[in-house]
Structures are given as structure tokens and as C-alpha cells.
């Protein structure tokens, strides 16, 4: 019931409310990459003079983690996980410092229980997951760097879902709402509007919040599992464990999409198109004509390049978003 009440609560914006886009999809579907493609497409359209339609006067898109007092954005990429990553890094940093002071695992668990009001079991699991991660990680490893260390997703999923969402199901929603209000008030100039791109909606209440409260353009990155796994392995050096793949944060978004057809735009066609084009390119390389003009080594090199481009290309590229911006927003 708390989430139903929250979903009807309007945020307080001075002047025109921001334009919001929300991406959702399983890990490795290209949410962050697609958010940046969208940002680039909007920026290029504004540079052509379309900004008068939006009253945008800023200088490009900025990730919330890179904002400074000197930033002058017309768009900001935000995420539900932004606050989560900051909390988990704070936990990691605190645990590492205190472990160097010869605190036992049990002592560290008691500290977490007292500070965060969590159970003994939650504290013990949190400490265990933190110390399963590599030592010496820096803040940018949690907040900015694309390649993630081992154990990163496990601790984010556990702390975000089994701890904070158990305490309050709308915890991360409220954090994001506050963040958007604060950023809108800080960076929006008079008679202007900001664009917010949310790159990681996952849970049903988060998706409802984006669609109903923020009135966001919902973008579903529906990517084949084998493609996502190859991307994750290339990016992180390993595939996620089974419990990570089947985590509720990976399954609820599919359920929401099944129940809310028509509320979102499904972005999977570009991969299918790329797959078809790649098939034709590969078949062409096997023709007698190509064999006569190219060496065997060159043909194999081109085949490998075509396959790699297919496997790791973003599902929703710049050209798709340029078309979307022109067709939907003006």
C-alpha cells in the first residue's frame, strides 16, 4: 500500500517539469550505452536549433556522478542504483578501514546492526559479501568505471533488495525522487527544462513510478540472453552466477513488460536487423567472387570483425534514437 500511495505522489518542480526517459532491461542489455546514445541524439538535435521547442540552453548531458558546481547540463543521466552504489561503497570503505584495526567479522557485523538497524543474519551476509570482493577498490570502481569487480553485483543486489527494500519497499524510489527534485532545482535555469535519463529501472514499483509519476518515455531493451552474456563476459571478464541471473531484479521487469504492453517502446529490432545484415555479409564473403579478390586470411579477419560487431553492438544505437527524438518529441 505504501508504494500505491507513493505512485500517486507528484514531485515538486518549479516551472516546467523535466522530460524523463527510463530504460529497463536485464544486465548486459545496454542500458547505460543506450542512455548515452539518446543523450547524444538529443544534444545534436538541439544544436540544430530544435532547442527552442524545449527551452533547453545547457551544454550537453552529464552523468550524475560527474556533476560539479560548474556543470551547465541540459540533461542528466541518473539511476536508482546511484544512491545504492554510494551506500555500498561507504560500507566497503568502512569495513576495510575497521578490519585493518583488527575488528573481527563478528564485531563488524555488530557495527552494521547498530548503525543500520539490520538483523544479525543480514549483517553477517553483508560483511561476508564485502570481504569476498577484491581489496583496495576505489570509489570510482563502484560509481563510474564500466568494468565491475567480482562480487560487485552480488553485494549490490543483496544490500539493495534483501536489506533496504526489506526495510522499506520504496526506499530507492524515494531516494531517486529526491535526487531528481534537487538536481532540477539546482541546474534548471528560468523558463528552461531539463531532461533526465534513468538508466536502470528494474522492479515493478520502480517501473510504475517512472511510467505513472514521472510520466517517462519507457524504453525496454529486450536483448537475447546469449548476446547479453557475451557482453558481460567481455566487459567484466566473467559471466554472472546463476543466483545473480535469476535475481528478482532481473525477473520483475519482464513481468511488468508482459502486463503493460503499450506503455513502453521495445528496443530489440536493431539487434535483429544487425543480425540479418551480418548474415548477408558473411554469405557474401563465402562467394567465389570474394574468394578471388581477397586472401583467405583477409576473409577470416573480416568474418571475425562482423561477428564481433554483431555480438557487442548496442541494441539501441544513435540512429534509432535520433529517429525517436524527431518522431516522438516534436
Image (spheres, rainbow, N blue to C red):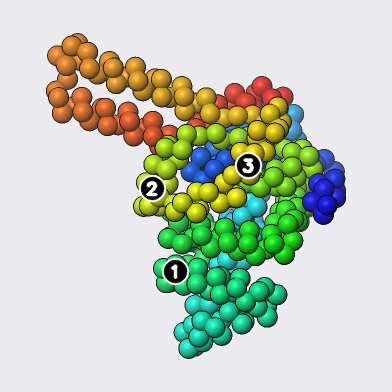
Which percent across, then down, holds residue 129?
Answer: 50, 68
Residue 295, placed above or below residue 179 = above
Is residue 182 toward the left or the right of residue 264 in the image? Answer: right
Whole-percent x, y for residue 171 in the image: 73, 59
Residue 7 vs 100, above or below: the answer is above
Q: Is residue 322 left or right of residue 5?
A: left
Residue of label 1: 132
User: How far, Cα to Cα, is label 3 from label 1?
Assistant: 28 Å
Tell me the residue at 44%/69% (across/down). 132
Disc 3, SS = helix
120 vs 233: above or below:
below
The answer to whether residue 285 is visible is yes
Q: Around disc 3, counting alpha carbons within 10 Å, would you say few (fewer than 14), some (14 to 19), or many (20 or more)?
A: many
Q: Position of residue 241 (x, y in %)?
A: 44, 53
Q: Residue at x 51, y 60 (%)?
A: 154
Q: Which residue is mark 2?
A: 233
Amino acid at each position: 500500500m505504501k508504494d500505491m500511495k507513493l505512485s500517486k505522489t507528484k514531485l515538486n518542480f518549479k516551472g516546467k517539469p523535466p522530460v524523463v526517459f527510463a530504460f529497463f532491461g536485464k544486465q548486459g542489455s545496454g542500458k547505460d550505452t543506450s542512455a548515452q546514445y539518446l543523450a547524444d541524439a538529443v544534444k545534436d538535435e538541439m544544436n540544430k536549433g530544435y532547442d527552442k521547442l524545449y527551452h533547453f540552453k545547457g551544454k550537453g548531458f552529464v552523468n550524475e556522478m560527474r556533476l560539479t558546481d560548474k556543470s551547465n547540463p541540459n540533461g542528466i543521466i541518473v539511476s536508482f542504483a546511484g544512491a545504492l552504489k554510494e551506500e555500498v561503497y561507504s560500507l566497503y570503505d568502512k569495513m576495510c578501514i575497521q578490519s585493518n584495526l583488527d575488528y573481527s567479522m563478528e564485531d563488524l557485523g555488530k557495527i552494521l546492526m547498530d548503525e543500520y538497524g539490520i538483523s544479525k543474519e543480514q549483517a553477517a551476509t553483508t560483511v561476508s559479501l564485502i570481504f569476498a570482493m577484491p581489496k583496495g577498490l576505489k570509489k570510482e570502481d563502484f560509481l563510474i568505471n564500466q568494468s565491475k569487480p567480482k562480487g560487485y553485483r552480488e553485494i549490490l543486489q543483496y544490500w539493495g533488495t534483501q536489506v533496504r527494500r526489506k526495510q522499506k519497499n520504496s526506499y530507492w524510489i524515494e531516494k531517486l525522487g529526491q535526487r531528481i527534485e534537487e538536481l532540477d532545482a539546482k541546474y534548471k535555469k528560468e523558463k528552461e527544462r531539463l531532461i533526465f535519463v534513468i538508466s536502470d529501472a528494474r522492479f515493478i514499483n520502480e517501473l510504475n513510478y517512472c511510467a505513472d509519476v514521472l510520466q517517462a518515455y519507457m524504453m525496454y531493451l529486450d536483448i537475447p540472453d546469449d548476446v547479453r552474456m557475451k557482453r558481460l563476459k567481455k566487459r567484466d571478464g566473467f559471466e554472472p552466477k546463476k543466483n545473480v541471473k535469476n535475481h528478482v531484479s532481473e525477473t520483475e521487469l519482464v513481468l511488468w513488460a508482459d502486463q503493460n504492453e503499450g506503455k513502453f517502446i521495445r528496443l530489440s529490432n536493431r539487434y535483429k536487423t544487425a543480425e540479418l545484415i551480418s548474415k548477408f555479409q558473411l554469405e557474401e564473403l563465402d562467394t567465389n567472387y570474394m574468394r578471388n579478390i581477397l586472401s583467405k586470411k583477409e576473409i577470416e579477419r573480416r568474418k571475425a570483425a562482423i561477428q564481433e560487431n554483431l555480438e557487442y553492438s548496442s541494441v539501441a544505437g544513435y540512429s534509432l534514437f535520433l529517429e525517436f527524438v524527431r518522431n516522438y518529441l516534436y
